[in-house]
Amino acid sequence: MKPQNKGVNDLVLFLLTFAYTLAVLLANTYEICLFWLVLSLLQLQLNGRVQWKYIFYFFLLLMIPSISLFITNYLHLREEVTGITKNILGMHLDDYRFRMSLYLVIRADVLSLISFSFLTSIRYDRLIYSMIQNLNFPVTWGYALMVAFNAVSKLKEEFVRIKQAVTMRFNKKPLFLFYIIPLLVSATRYSQQAAMSIQTRGLNQKKSFIISEKLILFDCLIFIINILGILILLFWYH
């Protein structure tokens, strides 16, 4: 086996996704939610995995639903009026309803950003190899998942070919529904060929791997430090 590439194991990042998500769910203020977001992004940055461009685009996509969610929460928190108001941009807003609505919106956005940032930084082929080698994950299931992940790029290429063929034949671009049946046929053929390939290769749990994705001491330390830090801060804030 070749030694593992430098950097934290993808299985560790996958598990930390759930750890930071749980920490945000247990946070009782929006300031703490933002703190967990910064800490998770710092964790990815230290490992050279953060995809700032995709995170920025995703953040922009969250703006409109976030504003809608804030207005909806504020309007429906009518029974908890405290009588204390604050002037924000010329509007008199109830302090409790404003802070609670802001907390709910920021928590939802932070959960989305943490999940998205971790999931875009994980190399899914390495994750599956790591699950097979460390968690005794079934090889047949693992390779079936890799086929599913690889099918995305294959279907994208097939969509381009179908689109070009339709344009050449009909000299116009039809509706997207026209492409569904050809894409389903292509996906069925691809899955059948992949299943036949897996079956004829006789893959089993004793399969050897060229690249080792075994967890090493560095990976365990990263995971333990993050978990202990999350637990200590959770008990501190509660």
Image (cartoon, helix red, strand yellow):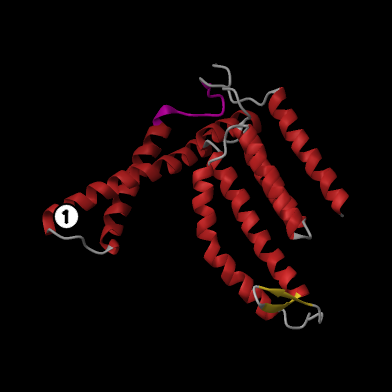
The residue located at (78%, 44%) in the rendering is: 230
Whether the magenta-drawn stretch holds residue 157 is answered as no
Choose top left, top right, bottom left or bottom right for residue 82. Answer: bottom right
Above/below status of 68 relative to 107: below
Q: Is residue 15 visible?
A: no
Q: Which class describes the residues within 10 Å of circle 1: few (<14), some (14-19), or many (20+)?
A: few
Residue 130, position in %: x, y?
Answer: 59, 31
Quadrant showing the N terminus: top right
The residue located at (18%, 55%) in the rendering is: 166
Q: Is residue 225 visible?
A: yes
User: Which amino acid type is shown beneath numbered disc 1?
Assistant: Thr
User: Tag count in the figure?
Assistant: 1
SS at mark 1 in the image: helix
Whether the magenta-drawn stretch holds residue 206 is answered as yes
Above/below status of 201 relative to 80: above
Residue 34, position in %: x, y?
Answer: 70, 53
In this rendering, position of residue 30 left or right of residue 182 = right
Residue 173, position in %: x, y?
Answer: 20, 60
In this rendering, position of residue 22 left or right of residue 112 = right
Above/below status of 167 relative to 75: above
- Identify the magenta region: 200-209
The residue located at (49%, 41%) in the rendering is: 145
User: 57 and 27: which one is in front?
Assistant: 57
Residue 83, position in %: x, y?
Answer: 81, 82
Query: Which residue is labeled 1 in the image?
Result: 167
Magenta segment, prevailing SS (helix, strand or loop): loop
Above/below status of 87 relative to 120: below
The residue located at (37%, 36%) in the rendering is: 196
User: 83 and 136: which one is in front?
Assistant: 83
User: 66 and 154: which one is in front?
Assistant: 66
Quadrant showing the C terminus: bottom right
